[in-house]
Image: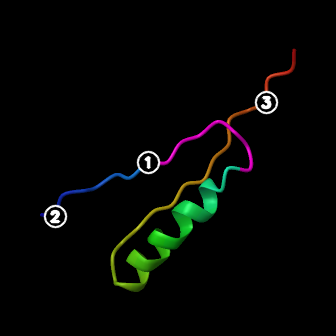
Amino acid sequence: MAKTKVIAVANLKGGGGKSTTVYNPVNGLALDGKRVLLVDVEPPRLKM
């Protein structure tokens, strides 16, 4: 059985290019035949 690998990219600042930074390597892995799951989330904005 293959081992699962987790790669995480985190930064609370908006507009930091996280989605683009993650999409390109994930797309390359998928094109290489690897099974991938990409989850892109944003924290809720707190209103003060």
Residue 44 falls in which quadrant of the image?
Answer: top right
Amino acid marked by disc 1? Ala
Residue at image x 79%, y 23%?
A: 46
Amino acid marked by disc 2? Ala
Per the model, the C-alpha gap separating discs 2 and 1 is 19 Å
- Find disc 2 in the rendering and name its residue: 2
Q: Which mark is residue 8?
A: 1
Q: At numbered mark 3, what does the secondary structure look like: helix, strand or loop?
A: loop
User: Residue 11 at x, y = what percent?
Assistant: 59, 40
Specify start and end residues of the magenta stretch as a single range.
9-15
Q: Please say whether residue 42 is one of the residues in the magenta stretch.
A: no
- Find disc 3 in the rendering and name its residue: 45
Give the crowd class for mark 1: few <14, some 14-19, many >=20 residues within 10 Å.
few
Indicate which label's residue lies in the foreground, 2 or 3. Answer: 3
Per the model, the C-alpha gap separating discs 2 and 3 is 38 Å
Q: Which residue lies furthest to the right in this view?
A: 48
Q: Residue furthest top?
A: 48
Taking depth in this image into account, of 16 and 47 the one nearest to the observer is 16
Residue at image x 73%, y 44%?
A: 14
Which secondary structure dominates the residues rendered in magenta? loop
Q: Quadrant of the C terminus?
A: top right
